[in-house]
């Protein structure tokens, strides 16, 4: 689907979409609890569908009514469950150790891009524990079971590996330890995991870069709700940086979501030519690039992990910003952007990446333009363009 956006100012009040980070974790914790639970704030995004598919693959029954999921928790032991993660990196990395608690053989499915985004942290663990695996273009087959141990994990690759282990290890018949061997980036995502685990009755002892996990713990069944999403709200609040008047409601001002830092970053982008480090908030990369190009420019560092997301977000944004007349220099872990954009002379591409599409959409409301591949927003924010229309943005869908 292509979407053409006209020059227009966003104005109005809108509620933040539910947090994808919380929703994934709340669904998984409810699945692992023995008994009936309920999670509110579950959208029809493709990532949420992927996590629900994996829950079902492990034998857990659920029912979804509008934005609420009712779960009859307690995974059943399966001979060879097939877990389809589609394009969700969180789903894949969270469920790999969980599946190895409840089965001795399992198969994960996903897109070629997903399977190429790197699973070496788990592969190193598999080698240490004698777990067999075969990585194919669009699947991963695993034989073996996770055992209590000391797990050494790098902290500068993805916090999702740590989260997956934190969910699974309390269920093992023995105590375990996770040692973070390099500085922990995206620390806030681990904090969200620990908060959810504590809510569900799981005790984790943290000692600086080490997590001590008692075995034989039990998750308790709860009725919970996902709070508003800072990551996707950033795209709505961005309109206020470029002359709009948008009130985004439903965000927890005391949230531990790391991407809530966008409010401070946006002030810097609006008023200065800042140097911004995205090491702890890589999902803010595309919108930060976009606003830097439309404001005063910026030097943006800590971008290495943007290259292994749904797309290479550094090169994708650089390519599209150049179509908008922006000057941008890219290095391995930084970019320098000079402010100033114009209407593109060709169609912009979404690179099959929801955050690229949303960032480019914000810019197109300034200069006008058409974006190809806008269906990518279905991954996290399926109602994005409908919400833009409620804010007075003029757009045309071309299917």
Image (cartoon, rainbow, N blue to C red):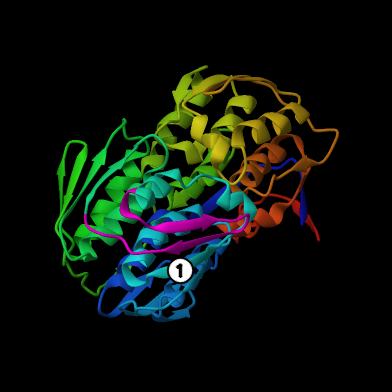
Quarter in which the N terminus is drawn: bottom right
Residue 2 coordinates in the image, percent (x, y)? 78, 53
Q: Does 130 lie within the magenta span? A: yes
Give the residue displayed 31% in from the left and 30% down from the top.
Answer: 183
Nearer-the-camera pick, 141 or 341: 141
Crowding at dot 1, Cα within 10 Å, few <14 / some 14-19 / many 20+, comes out as: many
Q: In screen coordinates, is 124 left or right of 222?
A: right
Residue 94 coordinates in the image, percent (x, y)? 40, 57
Q: Which residues are magenta?
A: 128-148
Nearer-the-camera pick, 188 or 110: 110
Residue 261 coordinates in the image, percent (x, y)? 39, 36
Q: Quadrant of residue 210?
A: top left
Q: In screen coordinates, is 304 left or right of 394?
A: left
As helix, strand or loop, the secondary structure at mark 1 comes to: strand
Nearer-the-camera pick, 349 or 241: 349
Res 160 seen here: no
Picture layout, residue 294 above or below residue 383: above
- Residue wearing tag 1: 106
Quarter in which the C terminus is drawn: bottom right
Q: Does 164 lie within the magenta span? A: no
Picture layout, residue 201 above or below residue 356: below
Q: In screen coordinates, is 327 left or right of 279?
A: right
Residue 52 coordinates in the image, percent (x, y)? 47, 71
Give the residue displayed 37% in from the left and 70% down from the top.
Answer: 104
């Amino acid at each position: 689907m292509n979407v053409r956006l006209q020059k227009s100012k966003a104005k109005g009040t809108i509620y933040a979409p539910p947090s994808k980070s919380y929703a994934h974790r709340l669904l998984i914790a409810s699945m692992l609890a023995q008994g009936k639970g309920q999670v509110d704030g579950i959208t029809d995004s493709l990532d949420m569908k992927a996590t629900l598919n994996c829950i079902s693959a492990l034998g857990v029954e659920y029912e979804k009514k509008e934005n609420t999921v009712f779960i009859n928790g307690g995974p059943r032991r399966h001979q060879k469950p097939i877990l389809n993660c589609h394009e969700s990196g969180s789903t894949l990395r969270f469920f790999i150790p969980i599946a190895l608690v409840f089965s001795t053989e399992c198969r994960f499915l996903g897109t070629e891009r997903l399977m190429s985004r790197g699973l070496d942290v788990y592969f190193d663990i598999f080698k240490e524990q004698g777990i067999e695996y075969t990585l194919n273009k669009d699947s991963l087959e695993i034989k073996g079971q996770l055992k209590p141990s000391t797990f050494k994990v790098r902290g500068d690759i993805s916090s999702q590996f740590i989260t997956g282990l934190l969910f699974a290890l309390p269920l093992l018949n023995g105590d375990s330890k996770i040692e973070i061997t390099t500085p922990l980036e995206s620390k806030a995502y681990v904090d969200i995991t620990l908060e959810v685990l504590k809510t569900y009755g799981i005790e984790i002892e943290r000692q600086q870069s080490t997590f001590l996990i008692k075995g034989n713990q039990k998750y308790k069944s709860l009725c919970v709700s996902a709070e508003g999403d800072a990551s996707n709200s950033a795209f709505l609040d961005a309109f206020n940086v470029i002359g709009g008047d948008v009130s985004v409601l439903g965000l927890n001002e005391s949230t531990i979501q790391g991407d809530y830092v966008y409010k401070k970053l946006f002030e810097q982008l609006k008023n200065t030519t800042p140097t911004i480090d995205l090491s702890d908030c890589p999902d803010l990369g595309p919108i930060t690039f976009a606003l830097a190009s439309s404001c005063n420019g910026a030097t943006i560092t800590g971008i290495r992990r943007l290259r292994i997301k749904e797309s290479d977000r550094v090169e994708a944004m650089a390519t599209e910003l150049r179509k908008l007349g922006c000057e941008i220099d890219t290095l391995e872990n930084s970019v320098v952007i000079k402010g100033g954009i114009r209407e593109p002379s060709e169609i912009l591409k979404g690179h099959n990446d929801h955050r690229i599409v949303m960032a480019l959409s914000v810019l197109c409301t300034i200069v006008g333009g058409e974006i190809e591949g806008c269906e990518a927003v279905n991954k996290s924010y399926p109602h994005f363009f409908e919400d833009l229309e409620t804010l007075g943005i003029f757009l045309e869908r071309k299917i």
